[in-house]
Amino acid sequence: MPQYLIAFNDEWVPPHTHDQLIDKRDRSLAVLDEMEQAGVFVFGNGGIDASTALFSVEAREGQPVFTDGPFVETKEHLGGFTVIDVPDDEAARDWAGRLAVALDWPQEVHRFPGMPE
């Protein structure tokens, strides 16, 4: 089955109170629990933003070169993601829709390309 990335950009999330974030966490965890029960959940994590960026690495002359923080200055940062393993795009749409409703912010879905034979 294909795997899909369901993700949101941190800039898409308006400011929330602590209580609002707790409520959204609980609702999204309920969806993730449903994913686990359905056997489609692979991995997920949230709560990441610019403050969680540790370092960047690039190759120079065949060697890794590390720099602190994000590679480029940008206001766009991955806020969280979930990877699911479902039979088709329609199933991915269903799960992404559930997360979008639970969190009340947009989700973006990508299908991982299959491995070449």
Image (cartoon, grey):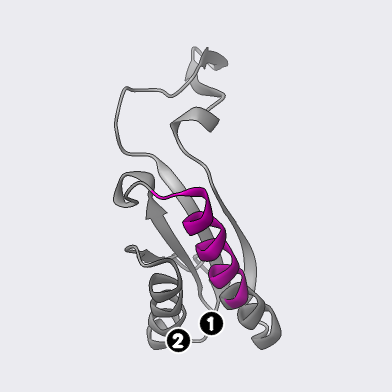
The residue lying at 52 percent from left, 15 percent from top is: 68
Q: Secondary structure at mark 1?
A: loop
The amino acid marked with disc number 2 is Ala
Q: Is residue 97 left or right of residue 52?
A: left
Q: Judge whether 22 appears above or below 39 on screen.
A: above
Chain part drawn in magenta: 16-30
> Most prominent secondary structure in the magenta stretch?
helix
Q: Is residue 12 magenta?
A: no
* Residue toward you, 113 or 50: 50
The residue lying at 34 percent from left, 23 percent from top is: 72
Q: Are marks 1 and 2 in contact (CB under 8 Å)?
A: yes
Where residue 71 appears, x then y in whole percent?
Answer: 40, 23
Where residue 43 appears, x then y in whole percent?
Answer: 64, 62
The residue lying at 32 percent from left, 50 percent from top is: 14
Where residue 13 appears, x then y in whole percent?
Answer: 34, 51
Residue linked to disc 1? 86
Q: Is residue 28 left or right of residue 90?
A: right
The residue lying at 46 percent from left, 38 percent from top is: 49
The amino acid marked with disc number 1 is Val
Q: Is residue 53 left or right of residue 11?
A: right
Q: Judge whether 69 appears above or below 97 on screen.
A: above
Q: Is residue 15 left or right of residue 66?
A: left
Residue linked to disc 2? 91
Q: Is residue 18 magenta?
A: yes
